[in-house]
Amino acid sequence: MDADRLTQQLAFLVEIDKLKGIIRRTHLIGVERFENTAEHSWHLAMGVLVLSEYADEAVDVMHVLQMVLVHDIVEIDAGDTYAYDPAAVALQAEHEQRAAERLFGLLPADQAAHFRALWDEFEAYTSADARFARAIDRLMPLLHNFYTEGRAWQEHGIRRAQVMALQGRIGEISGPLWDYAQGLIDEAVRRGYLAE
């Protein structure tokens, strides 16, 4: 056993526990508090497992799971960027790049390179696996917003066109999920959860 390797791996695991303390702007369904990023990562991973059959292209589910479990770790340093905040989104890449360097750098070199490659693939959005990961990453907050009666949308003055623009990536990898998402958005408008 390589004691230094184990020490690095355990230090990384202790560090990423901080993800539980990163609070998102997503209201939990049926619970009066906001979701944390670790909860989002778990829910996202479950979404990949449950919905992978709806990808229009073949996806490697295990690879997608690795991507979705790794991609938000950078929020420990960079924080959660609210998707409807253009100023924050403009700075997001720079902050997350620095965070990726530090956080994945805690691992032994081989694992650091593997995790960084997964994160880079998710960010590049070029592979079918990355597109599916991103689609499910968009879908989960949509479900939260709908099933909390648009609470976060209303708190931030979000309108239908903004939601449609953000959710559009779903249609790039899954026709059935995009159809469902559009129907949910239309129903949210009809019910008054989301402003036209």
Image (cartoon, grey):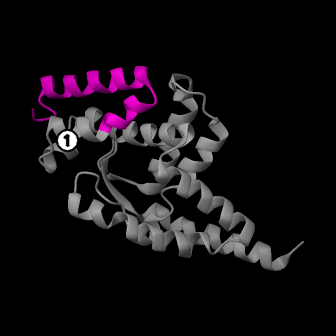
- Residue 90: x and y in percent read 28, 63
**Label 1: how many residues lie within 10 Å, few (<14), some (14-19) or many (20+)?**
few
Is residue 2 left or right of 107 when viewed as pictured?
right
**Number of marks in picture:** 1
- Residue 19: x and y in percent read 48, 63
- The correct choice, above or below, for 173 with respect to 65 in the image is above
Farthest bottom residue in view:
4
Q: Is residue 48 visible?
A: yes
Farthest front residue in view:
126
Q: Which residues are magenta?
A: 167-196
Residue 75 inside the magenta-drawn segment: no
Amino acid marked by disc 1: Gln
The residue under label 1 is: 162
Quick one: SS at disc 1? helix
Q: Residue at x 32, y 35 (%)?
A: 168
Is residue 27 left or right of 157 when viewed as pictured?
right
Q: Residue at x 52, y 46 (%)?
A: 42
Is residue 37 left or right of 145 when viewed as pictured?
right
- Residue 61: x and y in percent read 63, 36
- Residue 140: x and y in percent read 39, 38
Q: Residue at x 56, y 39 (%)?
A: 129
- Residue 172 sits in which quadrant? top left
- The correct choice, above or below, for 137 with respect to 91 in the image is above
Farthest right residue in view:
1
Residue 195 inside the magenta-drawn segment: yes
**Magenta part mainly helix, strand or loop?**
helix
> Quadrant of the image for the C terminus?
top left
> Quadrant of the image for the N terminus?
bottom right
